[in-house]
């Protein structure tokens, strides 16, 4: 039963008071003015079915600030966060702590995407016909088979003794394409189905953004049933939503999906329909043409403009051959419908692929970006809308429901205009809460003088020399964040020869293991890009220096950025000011946020890009960063770090 607004406001205030509920029940809890202000704003938005956009600086305590009013409200809540790791942290650590403190009988559920749950049917199917003589694959399948008899949840995350990228996992999990749904012989025992039923019965469900938008866009059996019952939607790490939502509101055509389908059809041809000889042959031919298509692209993984790539005659020929082979396979499968449930399922997947491909070949359409990305083995074509504002606005204002969007990095130049325009949230209430940390005392920002320009060849060696000085002054304890994999790899080759501290490199092992090693070693240097700019929380002396190689402007070759910039120009606006600069500011704020994570943390932030002080737009970056003491003198930064080491 929802609480009246006045009663809810009083309960929220009492929860965060000095002698309140949280202080009495949670060791070390101390009231923070910004946290209470956010909690009251969230409570008001929930009571009024309003829309709230709130930036809560690092250390505000935003998790408790939205959990307390959400739980006290008595309403049904979906809580979505950025990654599976954050999702598990919320569900297994923060949520139980607050629930216990408030002594509320709230039923909660954790829901992940379908690829995180064991598919019993596919396990049996592939365990009986092991698809390869690979001993590692056979061993992993055997371990999974043993675990399958013990698990209650079927959550693949329990398989800690199997590599995250094990080749066995695609054989024992389902996709929306190959799931048999209600026709599955073990439908009633389906782990995914059980997880979704629990979510539907829960008062609060914790999901991640990819799952939220995947199910929303696909009209899958998850949120098609879940969202209508939910009265409150909370997005944590909401700065990620524009890109994720854009992707899911678009269209995709993937060689991986094609090859998976061919693999399943070949399996059916070898087992259930041995008499349908042309099935395996046609699937094998489509598989071969799909692999040939990958050869039309550069060997190294890349992203590019699909409109331009499709102008090549050889590319058009490769795609036409795939289309013809797809049609042939479709007709063969269609002629045998009803003979086998697995084949009927493949027919639906074929029909979907047949309808998707033509959409991605219409290169003259406007309002969208057509782009490709390649991995070592695969190609994916994307059709991405340039703006999600209209679609998202309809979603948010379609029903009586409250929406909360929060992150430590949503504002640019102390305002929310950029985010609100992207998301169609121009009527939303906004709140900007500064971090409670004393940045002027705790941290120093250094932009070293005399550095080459970022694009100049001399920059790599200048970065190396600068990093060596900082690392020696701080005895490691450093994150070195890069805007490109190329520079990261160069530094990974050069830096270990110059220092005695251990160097950990992103990609050498899983992210979680790398972070564990960094903390355990206590004097390591971690080289990272992309995912290490955000969602990483290392507190205390273990991390007291963050070096950023340059301002994180997106690559001008990025096809989505190109398309958004062209669209901006056509509307008579400045694409740099409207698109590139705000995106770079938010990314830099995420990287900077790795340094100070607690009231007792101290450290140095070094941004190796003179444009921060020589270009007019540098002021926009600086205005958006925490108020640290500033210096242009690298020796002063080293002295700050050295003094910190002496103080221990």
Image: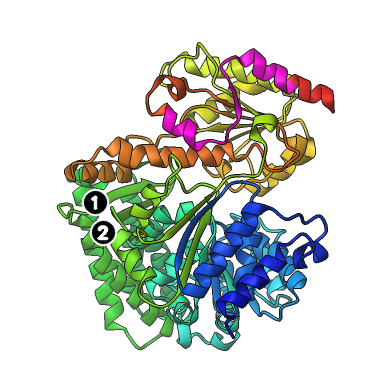
Q: Which residues are magenta?
A: 619-641
Q: Which residue is mark 1?
A: 318
Residue 558 appears in the picture as rendered: no
Q: Residue at (57%, 79%) from the top-left corner?
A: 199
Q: Which mark is residue 66?
A: none
Q: Check if mark 1's residue and mark 2's residue have beta carbons within 8 Å.
A: yes
Q: Which residue is mark 2?
A: 322
Q: Residue at (48%, 82%) from the top-left corner?
A: 229
From this viewpoint, which residue is outermost toward the right?
648
Q: Is residue 5 left or right of residue 102?
A: left
Q: Position of residue 599 (x, y in %)?
A: 73, 41
Residue 90 appears in the picture as rendered: yes
Judged by its main secondary structure, the magenta piece is helix
Please tell me in which quadrant of the rendered image residue 220 appears. Answer: bottom left
Secondary structure under tag 1 reads helix
Residue 631 among magenta residues = yes
Residue 576, compared with residue 357, is above or below; it is: above
Q: Position of residue 439 (x, y in %)?
A: 64, 34
């Amino acid at each position: 039963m929802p609480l009246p607004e006045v009663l809810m406001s009083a309960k929220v205030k009492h929860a965060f008071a000095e002698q309140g509920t949280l202080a009495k029940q949670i060791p070390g809890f101390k009231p923070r003015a910004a946290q209470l202000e956010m909690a009251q704003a969230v409570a008001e938005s929930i009571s009024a079915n309003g829309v709230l956009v709130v930036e809560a600086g690092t250390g505000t305590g935003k998790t408790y600030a939205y959990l307390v009013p959400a739980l006290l409200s008595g309403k049904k809540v979906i809580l979505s966060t950025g990654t599976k790791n954050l999702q598990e942290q919320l569900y297994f650590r923060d949520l139980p702590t607050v629930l216990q403190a408030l002594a509320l009988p709230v039923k909660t559920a954790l829901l992940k995407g379908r690829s995180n749950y064991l598919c019993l049917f596919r396990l049996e199917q592939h365990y009986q016909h092991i698809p390869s003589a690979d001993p590692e694959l056979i061993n992993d399948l055997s371990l999974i088979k043993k675990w399958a008899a013990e698990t209650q949840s079927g959550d693949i995350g329990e398989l800690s003794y199997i590599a995250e990228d094990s080749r066995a996992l695609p054989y024992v999990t389902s996709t929306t394409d190959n799931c048999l749904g209600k026709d599955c012989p073990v439908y009633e025992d389906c782990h995914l189905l059980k997880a979704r039923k629990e979510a539907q019965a829960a008062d609060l469900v914790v999901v991640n953004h990819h799952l939220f938008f995947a199910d929303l866009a696909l009209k899958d059996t998850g949120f098609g049933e879940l969202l209508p019952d939910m009265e409150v939607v909370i997005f944590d790490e909401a700065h990620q939503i524009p890109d994720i939502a854009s992707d899911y509101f678009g269209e995709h055509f993937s060689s991986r999906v094609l090859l998976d389908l061919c693999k399943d059809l070949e399996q059916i041809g070898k087992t259930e329909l041995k008499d349908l000889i042309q099935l395996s042959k046609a699937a094998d031919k489509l598989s071969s043409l799909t692999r040939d298509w990958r050869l039309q692209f550069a060997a190294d993984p890349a992203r590019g403009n699909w409109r331009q790539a499709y102008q090549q005659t050889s590319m058009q020929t490769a795609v036409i051959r795939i289309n013809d082979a797809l049609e042939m396979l479709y007709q063969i499968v269609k002629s045998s419908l009803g003979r086998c449930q697995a084949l009927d399922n493949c027919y639906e997947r074929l029909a979907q692929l047949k309808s998707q491909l033509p959409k991605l070949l219409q290169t003259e359409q406007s309002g969208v970006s057509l782009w490709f990305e390649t991995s070592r083995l695969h190609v994916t074509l994307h059709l991405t809308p340039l703006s999600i504002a209209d679609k998202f606005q309809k979603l948010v204002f379609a029903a009586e429901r409250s929406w909360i969007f929060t992150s430590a990095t949503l504002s640019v130049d102390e305002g929310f205009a950029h985010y609100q325009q992207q998301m169609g949230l121009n009527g939303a209430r906004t709140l900007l809460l500064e971090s409670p940390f004393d940045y002027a005392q705790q941290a120093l920002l250094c932009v070293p003088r005399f550095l080459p320009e970022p694009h100049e060849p001399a920059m790599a060696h200048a970065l190396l020399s600068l990093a060596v000085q900082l690392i020696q002054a701080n005895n490691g304890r450093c994150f070195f964040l890069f805007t490109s994999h190329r520079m990261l790899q160069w530094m990974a080759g050069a830096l270990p020869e110059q220092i005695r501290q251990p160097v950990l490199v992103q990609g050498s092992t899983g992210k979680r293991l790398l972070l564990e090693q960094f903390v355990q070693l206590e004097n390591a240097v971690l080289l990272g890009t992309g995912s290490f700019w955000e969602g990483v929380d290392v507190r205390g002396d273990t991390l007291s220096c963050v070096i950023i190689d340059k301002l994180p402007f997106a690559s001008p070759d990025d096809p989505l950025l190109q398309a958004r910039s062209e669209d901006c120009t056509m509307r008579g606006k400045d694409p740099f000011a409207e698109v590139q600069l705000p995106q770079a500011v938010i990314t830099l704020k995420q990287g900077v946020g790795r340094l100070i994570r607690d009231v007792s943390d101290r450290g140095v932030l070094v941004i190796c890009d003179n444009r921060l002080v020589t270009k007019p737009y540098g002021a926009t970056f600086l205005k958006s960063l925490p108020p640290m003491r500033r210096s242009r003198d690298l020796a002063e930064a080293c002295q700050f770090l050295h003094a910190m080491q002496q103080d221990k």
